[in-house]
Amino acid sequence: METTEQNIPQKPKKINIERIIIIVLAIVIIALAVYLAVYHKMKTNRDSANQPQIEEPKTAIVAMPVTARIFERTVTVQGNLESKNFALVSPRIAGTIEKFFVDEGNTVYANESKLFTTDSVALEQTVEINKKLLDIATSTEKQALANLEKTAADFNKAEIDYNRFKRLYEKKAVTADALEQQESRYKQLTAAITSAKANVELEKANVEKAKADLAIAEKNLADTIVYAPINGKISQRFKEPGEMGRPGEPAVRIDDNNIIETSAFLSAQYYPEITAGQTKMKVSVAGQDLGEHDIYYKSPTINPKLRTFEIKCLLDNSSQSIAAGAMAEVSVVLETRKGLAVPAESIQSRDNQFVIFVVSGEKAHKVPVQKGLENNGWTEVISSELNEQSMVVTMGQNMLDEGKAVSVQKENK
């Protein structure tokens, strides 16, 4: 029994040693596992550090700076060139056109160049008749003056006799009948003086009338030869010699091509925006740019049928490079303002908005913009993110997205 009791305490010691061995082995295994994990991670990091990094591919693009430009809001229409000064010349009196002194294309000068003449035979005879009538009226006037002088002399004698007989009658030297006869004679000659004076005035009026009739006849005769009323060139001849000419029926047209008038019609909606003397219009004819000119005329009314109104400007044609009758392309400048501009093709529509791409730090950045006016391939853009230093992509923008790496191949100036 003692032996058994002595052996019983020895069993726990063996168990404790096994546990210690197991724990130590576990610790060694865990430490080894941690070491292997750390070593593998360090090796992986070294391998990664030693391997060359793969760069993101860059998209080749063309870019240019955003620029400030003057933009214009215009309306373009077709217009006509017309002579500012022209004349439709017709005969002043009715008659057969005897002769033309000019032909189409000839240059004429105001009040100097003869244009044509009408039949003058009857008018020449009328002038001669009126000259004779004037002579007759002048002679009749002289006769009336002479008669007045004779009547005045008789009146003076009658007045003297009448006064003498009054004195004699007061002295009872003559009878009352003798005095009454002298009084009657005096009164008759007084009336005759009045009649003679009236006759003289009448004959003077007849002389003035004869002079006026002669002046009219001479003017009519002079009007058979028609002179050019303005400087210019004969652009059309409507009559030929032998044809009947009448006042109001043009025989020739004269155009002064030194000053040309450009006429155009605009829709009524633009009427409030046009101010004569301020609004400008650009004119070109057959590809020839004639510059920008002030509108000098704006129609005071709007055509009620077409709902249009007329505008005009003047062109100096001293060089004779244009002619009346040509068609012109007219651009009326309604508004002018300065703004940031980009090429129209650089603007894209993405996600229901207009955007452009700008380059910053070799990256493409998408910038939403609001489109404004467009002129000659340039579009006004409005955005708080843009300024004149911004580089906008003008080619290759279709392949870009936000943040994509880019390589600028060319910068357009």
Image: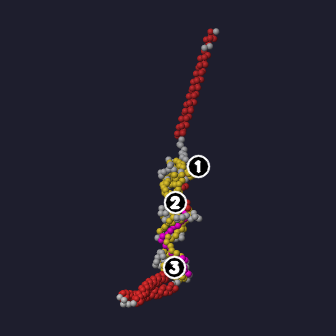
Q: Residue 202 appears at what percent x and percent y?
A: 45, 84
Cα separation, mark 2 vs mark 3, equals: 45 Å
**Residue 326, picture quadrant:** bottom right
Cα separation, mark 2 vs mark 1, equals: 36 Å
Cα separation, mark 1 vs mark 3, equals: 77 Å
Q: Between 207 and 232, which is closer to the camera in this rendering?
A: 207
Residue 11, magenta (yes or no): no
Per the rendering, the mark at residue 351 is 1
Q: Between 310 and 32, which is closer to the camera in this rendering?
A: 310
Of badges 1 and 3, nearer the viewer stands 3
Per the rendering, the mark at residue 273 is 2
Mark 2 closeness class: few <14, some 14–19, many ≥20 residues within 10 Å = few
Amino acid type assigned to the residue bearing label 1 in the image: Asp
In what element is the residue under mark 3? loop
Residue drawn at x 52%, y 40% is 50
Tags 2 and 1 in contact by the CB under 8 Å rule? no
Q: What is the chief secondary structure element of the magenta stretch?
A: strand
Give the residue number, with chain letter if any, for mark 3. 92
Residue drawn at x 54%, y 64% is 301
Residue 256, magenta (yes or no): yes
Residue drawn at x 51%, y 76% is 89
Q: Between 152 and 302, which is closer to the camera in this rendering?
A: 152
Of badges 2 and 3, nearer the viewer stands 3
Asked if one can make out residue 126 in the rendered structure from this viewpoint, the answer is yes
In what element is the residue under mark 1? loop
Amino acid type assigned to the residue bearing label 3 in the image: Arg
> On screen, 405 above or below 89?
above
The part of the chain drawn in magenta is 244-266
